[in-house]
Each structure stands twice: as structure tokens, then as C-alpha cells.
Image: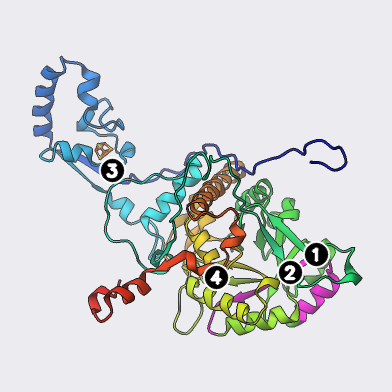
């Protein structure tokens, strides 16, 4: 109820409107479909009699996706339509062969699998949750986030939970420092925090294309989220959504523009002081690379009064330790140390590096992040070209293509829409109504390595991936 008008206040359910933004650059076919021509011809003759010379039926069988619906039927299959259901192979194993195409198999790099690239392309293009159904593909588990399973023990009722359910599931998170006590001297000042409707922001990318930044800025505005950049000339038209990374060169400009959130290199305590003194209403976040001593650094910064920590790994999700660990492990360590020191609730943690699939968002939050930043995923959604490894922040080999910013914006909105829907599905499967409750809730996950150790202790081959 609106207290001033005594009318029911307008309730708006947060939804991200998606619409198709088809690929502009041609993508490889995922499957290579081929038929043994003589056997196919013999079968067609046989079926022509059976289906009374109905050309449409004869040429389209047995694929309901229309792969054989072209002018030359199975002699020249429309490979881009194949979804790999394998029905044709099951019905005609002596005629049909379907395998992953060679072009598809070379997509991505050592971290980005062809499947991950395809998933992002299709999510950005259609705005729909990908549906996969090729049966058993081998044991679950793997490295990094793949070695972490989420608790999906709640029964999801579509009318109650999930994307279309009647009960609202909040994906809002706050960025900023939370007061630990009431200060009556400052009772008239609102706490310095900003709310974002999805726990995802765009992290900094050394991409040179201004069109990419315009697309990112516009998408951030549409979605109500933020984008991080070290170059404030990028996405300048969307300044209210910008989180600048401040250094000596950009300090004066930042102080003049007074952004609502600002980031700085966590090792520069001098910058932190200047920012806190001059931008008292801004949220000041320290960027800290994840490595061995990050937990101690995080505690020190939290005690010094920083409002948030942006913890980052490389673009493959490996931290910067001597013996690199996956971001999920190092994030957990930092989070747990902050909890132990009684500091965790005071600061916001943004985690970035290696967040490339929708499921990585809840998994990173379970490991202790409040929200995540995405980086190379943005470029993949915009059909950037893989030229090599994408691991290193400074020299990743992913070349952005020329894009229309409006098309790019829609692709990114679609990506967020699909990830938001999947986050809601996963939260409802956990019986949760607010993503903030998931933060650091390790009990909601199971680790593949731990389960193997627990179940098969002493059996070497069974305890390894
Ligand atoms: S695998 Fe399925 S989709 Fe592909 S050609 Fe065969 S029947 Fe059609």
C-alpha cells in the first residue's frame, strides 16, 4: 500500500524482456550428418511406395527437425537444423551417420569448450534456456565449477516456483557496506549501498571496440546493473551505470564526476584514503587479485573501512597463487576468513574470472560472493573470434568483431535474461526465495572430490577425476 495515496502500490515483478537477436556472423554446424547414398536411394524407393509417392513425407522422414526437408532430402541434408537427437541413426543405423563436426570441435580454447561457446551463442541469440537431451553423456563431475553440485532436493511445482511460478523469488543484491550498529549521530543518513536486480555486473575488459562498450553500457542501463571500466571514455553515455577503476591518471576526472560506485587497486591505500575523503556518498570497492594471502588482505581492507571487495582470478578462473587454484576454492577461503573475523557482513564481495555459464553464478555465490562479474563471456556472446588462449587478462586472444550496438545490447540483455531465469530455477529447486540467502551457504553444495574421497577412500582410480 502506498502510504501517501492510500492506493495499492503498483507491484512489478522483475523480468528481463528477451527477443531474438540472431547471429550476424555465420556459426559452424554442430553436427555433421551424412547418409550412405545408395542405401538411402533404395530406402526412398521402398518408402515412396509405402507413402504413396507423397514427396514431402518421403523426403522429410525420419527427422522431425527438417534436416532432410531440403530440395535434395537426405542427399544434401540441412546440417544446421540438426539437434543431435540421433533418431535417424537409431532407425537407420545402416544408412545414417551423425557426429560432431570438425569445425565445432575446434571452437574455443583450453578452457572454453565448444559446448560452452555454443551455449552462450544460443542464449544470446534466442534469449531462451538451452534444452539438452541427448541422454547419458558420461559421469558428472570435473574441474572447477564442474566439480561442484548444487542441492536440488526441493520439489519444483511449476505453478508455485520457477520462472512462471506465482511466488516471487528475489535476485536483488546490495552493493556497499552494511552498518553493524545504529549510529544516532548519523540517523538521517541513509546507508551507502546500491541495489541491483540481478547478481551480475560486467567486469572490465581491455576490448578496444567502442561499439562493444556502447552495447555493454546500454545493456547495463536496461538491466539496472553496472559495468566496470578502467577507461572512462568507454560507455561514457551510460555514466550512471559505470564503475570506473581509478588510478593516478583518472583520479581528478573521477572526483569531478562523482560516480555512485568506484573501484581502485586494493594495494593503493593512498588512493583509498583520497576516494573515501572526497567521495563520501560513493561506494568504494578495492580490486584484489585472488592469491595465497588474499584472505588476510581482505580482512585488512574490511577493517580499514572499504565498502566492498572485487576479487578476481584470470579469465580461466584460476587464481594467481604459486600453485593456482580454481576461483571457487580461493573465494571460499576469503569468505570463511572474513566470517571468522566477524567482518563478512560489512563488505560486499564481487567475484570475477571464469564465470562463463549460468550455473557459475549460484555456484560462485555459494562459495561466498554476493555477486559476480562477467568478462570474456560478454565477447563470446557478441560473437568475438577466438585466436588462441583467453586466460591472461592483459593479452587474451579473443578479437571483438564489428557490431551494431543495438544488436549487441539485445544479445547481452538476452544473456542476462536466460541466466536470470536459470538462477530462479535453481533457487526454487533449493527452496529459496532470495538469492542473498544463498551467499556462502556451502551446505547447499556437494563437492565431487569430497564425495569420491568419502565413498572410495583408498581406491586411487576412483578418487581421481
Ligand atoms: S540426429 Fe536427429 S536432428 Fe539430426 S538429422 Fe538425425 S533425426 Fe534429424
Left or right of residue 87: residue 218: right
Helix, strand, or loop for circle 2?
Answer: loop
- Distance CA(mark 2)–CA(mark 3): 49 Å
The disc, 4 or 2, on the residue closer to the chain's N-terminal end is: 2
Q: Residue at x 68, y 50 (%)?
A: 224
Q: Is residue 1 above or below residue 43?
A: below
The disc, 2 or 3, on the residue closer to the chain's N-terminal end is: 3
The disc, 4 or 3, on the residue closer to the chain's N-terminal end is: 3
Which is nearer the eye, 306 or 250?
Answer: 306
Q: Which residue in the protein does label 1 denote?
A: 191
The disc, 1 or 4, on the residue closer to the chain's N-terminal end is: 1
Asked if labels 4 and 1 touch by Cβ distance under 8 angstroms, the answer is: no
Pinpoint residue 376: horizontal percent, then vertical percent. 52, 60
Q: Quadrant of ligand 1?
A: top left
Q: Which mark is residue 232?
A: none
Dividing the picture into quarters, in which one does residue 262 lie? bottom right
Is-magenta flag for residue 66? no
Pinpoint residue 295: horizontal percent, then vertical percent. 59, 81
Q: Is mark 3 within 8 Å of ligand 1?
A: yes
Q: Which residue in the protein does label 3 denote?
A: 84
The disc, 3 or 1, on the residue closer to the chain's N-terminal end is: 3
Which of label 1 and label 4 is nearer to you?
1
Where the N terminus falls, by quadrant? Answer: top right
Is-magenta flag for residue 284? yes
Left or right of residue 208: residue 328: left
Q: Which mark is residue 177?
A: 2
Q: Residue at x 45, y 77 (%)?
A: 325
- Looking at the rendering, the stretch of residues picked out in magenta corresponds to 270-292
Q: Which residue in the protein does label 4 denote?
A: 394
Crowd class of label 3 (few under 14; some 14 to 19; many from 20; radius 10 Å): some
Amino acid at each position: 500500500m502506498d502510504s501517501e495515496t492510500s492506493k495499492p502500490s503498483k507491484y512489478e515483478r522483475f523480468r528481463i524482456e528477451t527477443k531474438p537477436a540472431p547471429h550476424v556472423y555465420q556459426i559452424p554446424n554442430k553436427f555433421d550428418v551424412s547418409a550412405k547414398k545408395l542405401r538411402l536411394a533404395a530406402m526412398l524407393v521402398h518408402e515412396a511406395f509405402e507413402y504413396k509417392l507423397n514427396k514431402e513425407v518421403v523426403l522429410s522422414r525420419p527427422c522431425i527437425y527438417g534436416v532432410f526437408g531440403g530440395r535434395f532430402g537426405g542427399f544434401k541434408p540441412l546440417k544446421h537444423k540438426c539437434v543431435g537427437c540421433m533418431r535417424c541413426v537409431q532407425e537407420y543405423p545402416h544408412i545414417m551417420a551423425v557426429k560432431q563436426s570438425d569445425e565445432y570441435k575446434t571452437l574455443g580454447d583450453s578452457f572454453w569448450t565448444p559446448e560452452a561457446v555454443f551455449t552462450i551463442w544460443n542464449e544470446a541469440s534466442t534469449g531462451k534456456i538451452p534444452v539438452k537431451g541427448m541422454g547419458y553423456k558420461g559421469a558428472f563431475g570435473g574441474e572447477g565449477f564442474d566439480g561442484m553440485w548444487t542441492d536440488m532436493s526441493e520439489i519444483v511445482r511449476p505453478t508455485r516456483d520457477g520462472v512462471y511460478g506465482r511466488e516471487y523469488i528475489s535476485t536483488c543484491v546490495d552493493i556497499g557496506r552494511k552498518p553493524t550498529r545504529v549510529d544516532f549521530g548519523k540517523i538521517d543518513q541513509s546507508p551507502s549501498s546500491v541495489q541491483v536486480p540481478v547478481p551480475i555486473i560486467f567486469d572490465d575488459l581491455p576490448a578496444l571496440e567502442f561499439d562493444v562498450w556502447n552495447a555493454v553500457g546500454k545493456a547495463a542501463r536496461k538491466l539496472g546493473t553496472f559495468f566496470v571500466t578502467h577507461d572512462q571514455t568507454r560507455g561514457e553515455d551510460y555514466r550512471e551505470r559505470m564503475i570506473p577503476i581509478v588510478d593516478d591518471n583518472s583520479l581528478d576526472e573521477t572526483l569531478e564526476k562523482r560516480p555512485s560506485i568506484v573501484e581502485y587497486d586494493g594495494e593503493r591505500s593512498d588512493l583509498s584514503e583520497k576516494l573515501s575523503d572526497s567521495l563520501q556518498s560513493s561506494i568504494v570497492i578495492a580490486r584484489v587479485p585472488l592469491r595465497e594471502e588474499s584472505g588476510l588482505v581482505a580482512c585488512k581492507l574490511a577493517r580499514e573501512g572499504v565498502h566492498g571487495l572485487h576479487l578476481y582470478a584470470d579469465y580461466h578462473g584460476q587464481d594467481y597463487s604459486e600453485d593456482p587454484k580454481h576461483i571457487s576454492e580461493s573465494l571460499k577461503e576469503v569468505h570463511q576468513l572474513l566470517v571468522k573475523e566477524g567482518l563478512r557482513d560489512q563488505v560486499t564481495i564481487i567475484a570475477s574470472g571464469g564465470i562463463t555459464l549460468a550455473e557459475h553464478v549460484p555456484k560462485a555465490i555459494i562459495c561466498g560472493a554476493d555477486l559476480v562479474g562477467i568478462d570474456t563471456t560478454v565477447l563470446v556472446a557478441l560473437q568475438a573470434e577466438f585466436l588462441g588462449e583467453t586466460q591472461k587478462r592483459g593479452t587474451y586472444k579473443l578479437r571483438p568483431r564489428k557490431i551494431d550496438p543495438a544488436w549487441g545490447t539485445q544479445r547481452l540483455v538476452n544473456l542476462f535474461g536466460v541466466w536470470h531465469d536459470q538462477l530462479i530455477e535453481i533457487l526454487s529447486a533449493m527452496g529459496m526465495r532470495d538469492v542473498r540467502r544463498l551467499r556462502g551457504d556451502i551446505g547447499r553444495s556437494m563437492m565431487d572430490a569430497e564425495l569420491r574421497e568419502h565413498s572410495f577412500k583408498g581406491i586411487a582410480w576412483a578418487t581421481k577425476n
